[in-house]
């Protein structure tokens, strides 16, 4: 049995990825603070393995404890491929430099950058079988948005970690693949958070409100399908940042 370890599978893109994986008979290991009961029921209906681990990704010690349990679960099965989707992310704090809330800033760095690096590090060191690791990035990793200095910085850092770790795996002749995936603008709770900010804290507020009003936000399941289809390919380019617009024509 193959497995997908997905952070932030309780809602949004993470939930949609998990649902598509279930339909492909891939076992689900969900890691988030809250459990998605609908996902649990879907897995049961399709007789697909499902296990949820509650974890606060802002706490490094919880990540270490949780992923020891995840590894124990994986060791009980003979998996050819383990998909790791570092999907969990936060946009807050939305504010200009000089006005950032420090607690929100620390949480942003922990969830968006430290957690996926730690998870990748733990699994690369210990897990057996071939892994395909996806770090969910953003267009904000490559373009500065006023008011998103924390989000832009952590996503840029995640892209560089992806490229570096992938190069390291290539050097040692590993079969593991590590990519980043930029999902574009989706109709998720994060977009709602963005639209609820102010012009003073986020300079492009009106543009993002227009995305919603004009129906330009992609449904999360469409984006999830594009990512899962990519992962099912025999060949993916190690270290590449894949953009959803390249995958959906």
Image: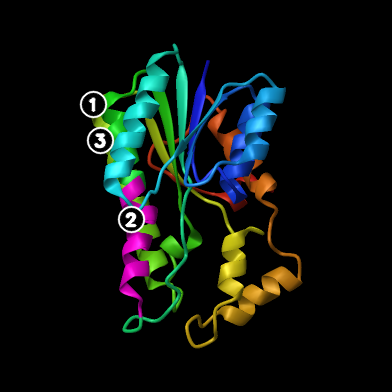
Q: Main secondary structure of the magenta part?
A: helix
For mark 2, give the secondary structure. helix
Please tell me which residue lies in front, 239 or 216. 216
The residue tagged 2 is 110
Circle 3 Cα neighbour tier, 10 Å, few/some/many (<14 / 14–19 / ≥20): few
Residue 73: % across, % down? 41, 21
Q: How is the image coloured?
A: rainbow
Circle 2 Cα neighbour tier, 10 Å, few/some/many (<14 / 14–19 / ≥20): many
Please tell me which residue lies in front, 178 or 191. 191
Side of 92 where 105 appears, left or right: left
Residues at marks 1 and 3 touching, judged by CB atoms closer than 8 Å: yes
Q: CA distance from mark 1 to mark 3?
A: 7 Å
- The answer to whether one can see residue 111 in this image is yes
Which residue appears farthest toward the right when viewing the image?
Answer: 214
Residue 40: % across, % down? 63, 32
The residue tagged 1 is 172
For mark 3, give the secondary structure. helix
188 in relation to 248, above or below:
below
Which of discs 2 and 1 lies nearer the camera? The answer is 2
The residue tagged 3 is 168
Q: CA distance from mark 2 to mark 1?
A: 28 Å
Residue 160: % across, % down? 32, 51
Q: CA distance from mark 2 to mark 3?
A: 23 Å
Compare marks 2 and 3 and give the one earlier in the sequence. 2
Residue 43: % across, % down? 65, 27
The part of the chain drawn in magenta is 100-115
For mark 1, give the secondary structure. loop
């Amino acid at each position: 049995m193959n497995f997908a370890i997905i952070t932030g599978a309780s809602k949004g893109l993470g939930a949609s990825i998990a649902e598509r994986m279930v339909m492909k008979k891939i076992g689900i290991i969900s890691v988030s603070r809250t459990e998605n009961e609908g996902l649990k029921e879907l897995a049961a209906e399709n007789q697909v393995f499902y296990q949820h681990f509650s974890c606060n990704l802002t706490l490094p010690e919880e990540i270490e404890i949780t992923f020891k349990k995840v590894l124990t679960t994986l060791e009980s099965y003979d998996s050819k491929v383990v998909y790791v989707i570092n999907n969990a992310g936060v946009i807050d704090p939305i504010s200009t430099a000089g006005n950032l809330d420090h607690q929100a800033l620390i949480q942003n760095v922990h969830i968006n950058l430290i957690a996926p690096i730690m998870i990748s590090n733990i699994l690369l060191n210990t897990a057996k079988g071939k892994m395909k690791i996806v770090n969910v990035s953003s267009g904000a990793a490559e373009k500065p948005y006023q008011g998103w200095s924390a989000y832009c910085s952590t996503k840029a850092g995640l892209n560089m970690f992806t490229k570096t770790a992938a190069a390291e795996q290539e050097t040692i002749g590993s079969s593991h693949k590590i990519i980043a995936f930029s999902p574009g603008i989706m109709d998720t709770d994060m977009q709602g958070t963005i639209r609820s900010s102010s012009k003073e804290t986020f300079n492009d507020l009106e543009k993002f409100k227009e995305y919603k009003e004009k129906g330009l936000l992609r449904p999360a399941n469409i984006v999830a399908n594009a990512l899962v289809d990519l992962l099912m390919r025999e060949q993916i380019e190690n270290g590449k940042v894949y953009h959803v617009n390249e995958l959906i024509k």
